[in-house]
Image (tube, coloured by chain):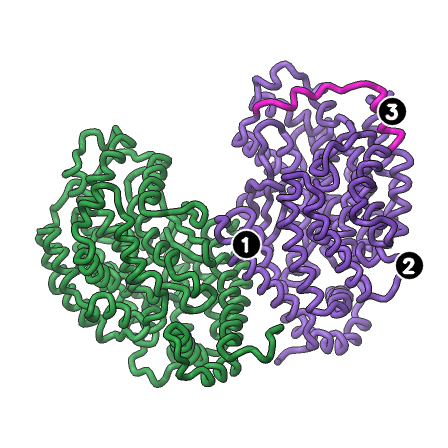
Amino acid sequence: MSRPVDSSPLDRLKSILGEIADVQHAEAVADWDSRVSMPPDGAEARANVVATLTRIAHERFVSDEVGELLAELDGVADETDAALVRLTRHEWDRARRVPSDLAAEMAHAAGVAVAAWDKAKAASDFASFVPHLERQLELKLRYIDCFPDIEKPYDVLLDDYEEGMTTAEVQRVFDRLKEVLVPLIANRRDGGVALEGRFPVERQQEAGVRVLDAFGYDPQTWRIDETPHPFASKPGAGDIRLTTHTDAGDLTSLFSTMHEFGHGVYEADVDARLARTPLARGTSSAIHESQSRMWENLVGRSRGFWRWFYPQLQPLFPEALGSVDEEAFVRAVSAIRPGLIRGDADEATYGLHIILRFELEQELLAGKLAIRDLPETWNARMQEYLGVDVPDDAHGVLQDMHWSIGLFGYFPTYQLGNVASVQIWEVARRDLGDLEEQFARGEFSPLREWLREHVYRHGSVYPPRELLRRVTGSDLDPEPYLQYLQTKFA
Amino acid sequence: MTGSPFDRLRERLAEVSDLTKAATLLVWDQRVMMPPGGAEARAEALGTVSRLAQERFIDDEVGRLLEELRGLEESSGYDSFEASLIRTTRREYEKATRVSPELVGEMRRASALGLSAWGPAKESSDFEQLRPHLEAQLELRHRYVSCFPAGDETYDVLLDDYEPLMKTAEVRQVFTELKDELVPMIEEIRDAGDVDDSFLRGEFDPATQRKLGLEIVRAFGYSEDEWRLDETGHPFMTTPGAGDIRLTSNFRPHDLSSLFATMHEFGHGVYEWGVDRSLARTPLHTGVSLAVHESQSRTWENLVGRSRAFWRWFYPRLQQAFAAQFGSIDEETFYRAVNKVQPSLIRIDADEVTYNLHIILRFELEQDLIDGRLAIPDLPDAWNARMDEYLAVDVPDAARGVLQDMHWAGGALGYFPTYALGNVISVQIWERALEDLGDLDERFERGEFGDLREWLRQHLYTLGARYTPQETIERVTGSRIDAKPYLRYLREKLAPQVA
């Protein structure tokens, strides 16, 4: 290492963290590439590369040197530096518990299992995925064992995505949601007309680009590609990557494009001074999701948005939309329609898809549910909560990739994001006045600017709970979200 | 640490290989995918990942393991995997540890600076903009050379980075033989009159070019499971991992050069593709040298892709795709046009014959520079004079002269010779393949290239870097590097034009 020995502890810490950020940059590109551009036979070599990068970043991070620097920096005065030390200490304490070999095994198993999941899903063949899921579960349990002082195993997992969140708090929010949503859905099961017809892929992509342009997408620093499963990624500053999935049979690509924009803009607008530190990213999965949901739903399904955009969209699809007026269109994109696929679910039923996964994950980890019984349990609960019959595992338990890459404890953050999105939205509306009128004129920059100022620029300077309190004055609270749904679907 | 010393060496080399592959991917992504705004963060990331790979390779632990493994190397057969890996790693380790990390860092920075100055300098055809960078590069090269024991010639050290164990004297001998024959040959062709190739310029839809390029390389052995093809300003090939071969081509709308660039890059790709997979994650899992690599890109681009038999197969398809352009052009006329020999200014656009003189010129100038016979400010004049001497062309400006290539700006001195050596080696290998396989024309005419590919895989590709380049060439061809087969090939091919 060619660091001058006389540099300050803060400089030395930043130098190490910068090096780790660079390795993670490489990991992010490796991951993006494996989903966007890698030929399929490159998967095995790629899994090795990612495992090595993960291990090197991990080893560098958990070194005694980092611990010593953190100790020296205890009580540092500057607010941002203090935040860096705080977050680094939190992550260092956690990472120290996990042996490098386990971290590498987890990374390697994820690379292999995601490829297996892809095949299993395509063939709707759960049996071929079972060994991989078993392996992931075993690795997760070993991971949980690294934290013997945390009482509830599921709390260990939650904290990775949502610092400070507990299973009990999630349970409380979800119980309240279930109480309102199940009857709301049951009463509205017939609602809304489905949009039918052909929506040519290039036209949808054109519409997506127009929306992104208005939201503030910049081709100098962003790109968008097609993948079966949309996602957003930021390998490094000035490099924001969205993906979307365009299917000529419906218009969902528009909403997934807006969704991923929300993730992208959060990352794009983090203060540039935080680059190459752990503070240079959104503060948690739920807060991230609050932003993707905000741009997808609170903006992208609002009446104001469609007052502006429907006159542009309609002529792109004269056959399918020629005889659909704006009012009918807005109703159609906001209809409650219980379905099989989480990714396609409407605002009201989405939460139940998540609650189901949250429950099954806890049962799997507690050994109350065997993996081989998973499809049956899945299907039974889909019937119970949403009243739908699952025809095959591709449309059931195999639909999401999360478990294949070891993401247990992640799903709840999606729904917590919905909840937080409306809490933040209400404050923005209070400050900015009638947003719908601005949207109707195609103006989105006041909202983006407000969000940049209050949320995005801070990156991870504040932990999620603190950020939410600073912006909204309260903790996670399901009531604004429920009120929004009840008003919208009254 | 557990496991035998050999296992531990393999583990360390696998880690270095993974980091190198990560860096490879970062470069590919930067050239093909990355939004421009990401450049700064990418430079940092690439710098760190490359440095980590280097640090892990030159670590004392590797030296200790190599010492411990001397016994195993001697007791294993020369051809064994163990001996090959230890031998090759030792050679690379001994080279790498001679150069201080500071100098490596300085060279990397100078390279980045030089390359970023090269673009604008070429754009404005202003040698003066690049001059200080070239002077810095030359100074760094001298410092680099002084890390190694004095050999026969200073240039040997530079050459060794790209063509391990190759000596300047041997290259000079091959190139002298080429020059002696090619300069008069080009004059004769010039006197014989013009070949019409005007129909090769026109409107060629880039999407159709890409489609045709894919049709060709699929017949060669490209498959979607293991390969991809993208567009970049400068075509290249890279492999971010086993089973992951990436080509790029440049689909220029007014000519068909992309077809040849695609076949050229396929040649590089198929060499990497064919390396024995059991060598993956070791330094042996790669083509053995730049010259041998280039021999394969040239084989697929020229020996296959500019052959009569190839066009007998593909010309009807091309004619159909670009009917307006080629409707009235017969196959023979087309064949002669894509094989036209004509002295020109730009190396990468040069034909099979004149190409070598572009290289010889650079090889000579590089030696003059490193040996102090030529000062950087005098480089443009020396360049232009020699272009006139060898190819009888007037260089109108530096952009089309000394600034045309990025190599020197990035510090790559000693690289150019490998291109022409590749031409030479390609025909040596080709002759051996024909001896074993018989006449390939009939197969090419039917669009069948599998026999050739399989022969090359079995005899050359699979070896990877188990042996030195010279040993590899000798194993495949039975002789050292030799200009005669290549000259024979050119004479036969060009007989109609010269006569």
Image point 56% across, 48% down: which residue?
B31
Whichever of labels 2 and 3 marks the residue nearer the N terminus, that label is 2
Does residue A91 appear anywhere in the picture?
no
Identify the chain drawn in purple.
Answer: B
Looking at the image, residue A432 sits to the left or right of residue B348; the answer is left
- Identify the amino acid type marked 1: Gly
Give the CA separation, mark 2 to mark 1.
44 Å
Looking at the image, residue A235 sits to the left or right of residue B81; the answer is left
Q: Position of residue B116 (x, y in %)?
A: 62, 50
Looking at the image, residue B160 sits to the left or right of residue A132; the answer is right
Q: Which mark is residue B152?
A: 2
Instruction: Look at the numbered disc 2 and give the secondary structure of its residue.
Output: loop
| Residue nearest the observer in this picture, A400 or B496 | B496
Instruction: Look at the numbered disc 1 and give the secondary structure of its residue.
Output: helix
Q: Residues within 10 Å of mark 2 (few under 14, many from 20)?
A: few
Image point 72% across, 23% down: which residue?
B337
Residue carrying label 1: A42
Identify the chain drawn in green.
Answer: A
Is residue A283 found inside the magenta-colored segment of the image?
A: no
Q: Which residues are magenta?
A: B183-203
Residue carrying label 3: B188
